[in-house]
Amino acid sequence: MKFRLKALGLHLLASTVVLSSILGTLYLGWYHWPGWHLTDVVHVVIVMVGVDVVLGPLLTFTIARSTKPRRELTRDIGMIVAVQLVALVYGTVSLWHGRPLYYAFSESILQLVQAYDIDDQELALARRQKAEFAPHWYSLPRWIWAPLPEDPDERGKIVAAAITGGDDVISMPRYFKPWEQGLPKLRTELKKVDAVAYFSTGEKKLLKERMRAAGLPTDQLNSMPLTGRGHPLLAVFDPASVKIIAIFRAR
């Protein structure tokens, strides 16, 4: 039993260190608030933790015996580690391709743009036409303005594509503009909490309670939804400076 517990402890320590390093790097670089919430990647992380931190060490505890030949023990642990590596690579690749790249103001809402939202064709166009907004592997999340193009034909094509499930302008970095340039337009789109879409009546009640607890007014034009693949959040602005004061969960 002492040998098994030692094997369990060493395997658990190694798995925890490796997984924590990967998740910590991704969180600090790309998934920090509100990215983690909006990407809704909890299921991926659960798989990684379940296989790498729970299942792997438990299997090692089960098969480890001091009387087992060293070669056989090495083989068994190697098979367990191989399964762990598959889960680790799957989760890491999924999180990498889904990492947050932009928080975009477009039309009347704020939207999260993830790495896999931008296809290779749009990436190539951005690098030729708007290199300063084209993402790279080292690009960290940034706030941008993504207005529809002024050309009516281009605008119509994008709107039609978005309606039918195709790419929207937030997936086209060649149309991106600096965040500061969009603030005058953003100010005109701010609403009172009760007028913001995406939230139920009960959620709006909870949001107003949280705003009041933070000392923020609930009867001003100061709110805008922040959307992604997870449940929407509420971004609250200072109407004068158009700076984000707080971001609230609705649940």
Image (cartoon, rainbow, N blue to C red):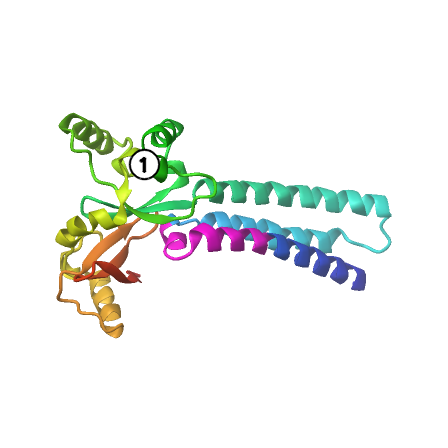
Query: Which quadrant: the C terminus?
Result: bottom left
Disc tally is 1
Q: Is residue 35 visible?
A: yes
In the image, 29: left or right of 39?
right
Q: Residues within 10 Å of mark 1 (few under 14, many from 20)?
A: many
Q: Position of residue 74 (x, y in %)?
A: 79, 45
Closer to the camera, 45 or 178? 178
The residue closer to the viewer here, 141 or 159, is 141
Magenta segment includes 31: yes
Res. 199 in view: no
In reply to whether residue 171 is colored magenta, the answer given is no
Residue span colored magenta: 19-38
Q: Nearer the viewer, residue 115 or 72?
A: 115
Residue 119 on image: x %, y %: 38, 31
Give the structural element (helix, strand or loop) at label 1: helix
Which residue occupies 37% across, 37% down?
134
Image coords of residue 94 (percent x, y): 48, 41
Residue under label 1, please give it.
Answer: 173
Question: What percent of the width, then of the height, locates residue 246?
Answer: 29, 63
Please tell me which residue is depicted at 80% across the width and 47% down the height of the picture.
73
Residue type, numbered disc 1: Pro
Using the image as rendered, state which of residue 86 and residue 211 is in the foreground: 211
Compared to residue 212, the image places residue 12 above or below, namely: above
Q: Quadrant of residue 244?
A: bottom left
Residue plotted at (57% across, 41% down): 89
Residue 149 occupies quadrant: top left
| Residue at 35% over, 45% down | 102
Quadrant of the image containing the N terminus: bottom right
